[in-house]
Amino acid sequence: MISIVIPVLNEGATIRQVIKTVKKTARKIEIIVVDDNSTDNTVEEAMKENVRVITSSQRGKGISMREGMMAAKHDIIAYVDGDILTYPDNIVDLLTGPIENDEADFVKSYFERQAGRVTQLVAKPLLSILYPDLAHFQQPLSGMIAARKSMLASVQFENDYGVDIGLLIDMHHLGARITEANIGKVENAMQTWEQLSKMSREVSRTILKKAENIPQENLETLGNINLIREQMEYSILESIDKLQKMVIFNLDHAVFTQPYLECAAIAFDKEEELHRILGAHTDPVTLNTRIAALFEGRNIAELLEVADAIPLVPDIREVVRELKKRGYACGLVTDGFGMVARHIKNKLGMDFVFANKLHLVNSVATGELTIGEYFLKEGQYCKSHLLPYISREYKMNTQNIIYVGDGKQDGRLLIEAGIGVAFCPQYQRAHVEKVADKIISGLSLAPLLDIAQASPAKFGIKLPVITKKQARNIGVGSLVGLAGAGLLYLAIKQIRKKHTASC
């Protein structure tokens, strides 16, 4: 006997057809539909087919899969999705046959459809690094699987997009015999850009979590993973033409409470050199290139450790989460390094980054920098060139873009964005009022939710502080303390006022 578990959420239009297809097998089966608290007629439709229907204790596919396993009465369990109408009539036989014949303990399906972007750009590359024995699976994210109940009871069901890859890895850890089954042609709905972004983060998080105890060359792995995430990000941006609205945050002036480059210079005993560069150069390309050279020889772990030590604007996570609920794509822009910006983007659940690229070889900075093409126009560098680039490449109306920056360095961006928001401006209010549509004076981004045309949530604000002990623990150079970076920052600002244009 075989138990078929079908996790469902708002699949009233398809669930009966899926059940009818599953019933075409000659094998003796029970069918369990696990409803993930649907708000449509899914349960009513499923019950018309005289199958067992249970309601999961809370939302999440992983929980539904686990509770379906608990309810199953037989030792072989197959899972199928409830929204696919193109299953072959022998779907149950294909998934469970190798287990019944004692040829496998776990069966992973693949099907005749080009693997998705998250599979190709995230799952497979990460598996090739961390689990090379699993890299050959054609569609490691497929949710149509079968396994022995006794083994499923011993694994963890992630409760997000990482559930399917997590089961594959856990079965591998258990020493299960794993095989693939071709289930023919499968058609399902394409993922939206936001779903792809969320899937990418959750799949990569699951793989990395499962791989915590695997010995590896840390620096090389960090560099490879950073490259994988960067490639996925560019792929997601290819779908950005479907977006209606966007918020772009200046990383150093609306996310970090202290500028990254100044903090890194202190951490690596380069503050005097940085001070000299800022005082000697006005051309942005030369300035950024010379600054990048200061970090030659520093590895990715050290560079990201500095970023992790900088306090963020206290309510940035909550604000980004709410903006995304309202349909905004959220991202970062910086004159600094893309690898740092992407690290923060991933931590905050944002969608994209526009930055310059610091070159790494074997995960160590060479000191060379490639300027982002979106900052250049006819050889001239300015971050404001980003807006026409977005409009041209991703069909985004710039009037639907909210830009959040510091009020002077971002003058043209504040003017040319649909809504320019000056956040905690350090400059004369008269200047800011000329270029910004809105001004946020306090150290909280919650007012941005009013600007984004909805009532803001109430956030508790508490600014984290970097202690001297934390600074010493970073272990890079003779770090006086990142909390003291503001002193250098104020001095540098005086130079920048004299030498930096409004770009």
Image: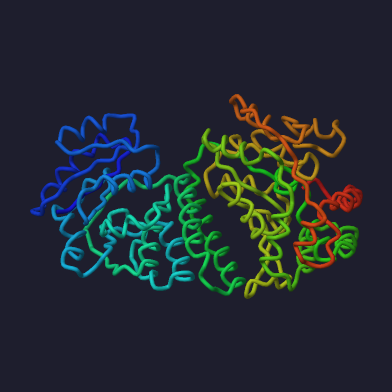
Q: Is residue 320 above or below residue 258?
A: above
Between 290 and 343, the one nearer to me in the picture: 343
Describe residue 449's horizontal placement relative to residue 443 as left or right.
left
Q: Position of residue 147 (x, y in %)?
A: 26, 59
In the image, 188 versus 396, the foreground residue is 188
Q: Quadrant of residue 182?
A: bottom left
The residue located at (37%, 55%) in the rendering is 164
User: Can residue 168 be seen at all in this image of the molecule?
Assistant: yes
Q: Residue lying at the far left in this picture: please name it.
A: 26
Q: Is residue 326 above or below residue 138?
A: above
Q: Give residue 46's quadrant in the image.
A: top left
x, y percent for residue 102: 19, 68
The answer to which quarter of the image holds residue 406 is top right
Relative horizontal placement of residue 395, taking residue 487 as reference (left or right): left
Q: Would residue 172 appear left or right of 105 to someone viewing this image?
A: right
Which residue is drawn at the image coordinates 64% and 36% (left, top)? 402
Locate residue 297, reporting x and y percent.
Answer: 74, 73
In this rendering, the count of numbered labels is 0
- Residue 262 visible in rendering: no
Q: Residue at x 73, y 56 (%)?
A: 380
Give coordinates of residue 186: x percent, y percent: 25, 53
448 shown above or below 197: above
